[in-house]
Amino acid sequence: MEVFDQELHLVLSAYARSQVTLPALKEWLATAIWRLLESPSPLDRMVVGELELALSAHDSGQLDEEGLKRQAEALLFILDAVRLRLHGTMAMSVS
């Protein structure tokens, strides 16, 4: 697993478990977006794109924070499912 991929998983997991605040998630994303360009993983880019869409929906009032956390959990599920299918490995799950 690449460094960016690990960090993405950890941040999404922490946010879904309320261990990271929404402002901290946004700050991480603002600084991480440049490293994303260096990631060889189209999956990372897709997940970050979906996260940006969910944050935009939240900012416009279309999605509450609980919905945003559910979206983070869904993105974690996608990351884990694809990783398992491609590599036979599973990252840390949300618990």
Image (cartoon, grey):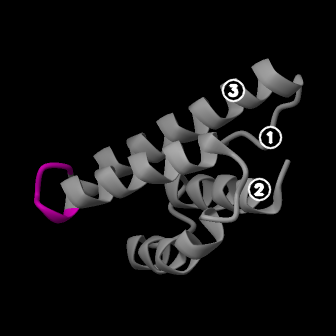
* Label drawn at residue 82: 3
Give the foreground label among 2 and 1.
2
Callout 3 amino acid: Val
Q: Would you say 77 lies left or right of 39 here?
A: left
Q: Residue at the spot x=50%, y=71% of the render?
A: 29
Callout 1 amino acid: Ala
The spot of residue 67 in percent (x, y) is: 30, 45
Which is nearer the N-term, disc 2 or disc 1?
2
* Label drawn at residue 6: 2
Which is nearer the N-term, disc 3 or disc 2?
2
Does residue 13 sit above or below 20 in this rendering? Answer: above
Q: Would you say 34 lies left or right of 60 here?
A: right
Does residue 60 sit above or below 33 in this rendering? Answer: above
Q: Residue at the spot x=45%, y=73% of the render?
A: 21
Label 2 and label 1: CA atoms lie apart by 8 Å
Quadrant position of residue 89: top right
Q: Over which residues does the magenta segment extend?
A: 59-63
Mark 2: give few (<14), some (14-19) or many (20+) Cα within 10 Å. Answer: few
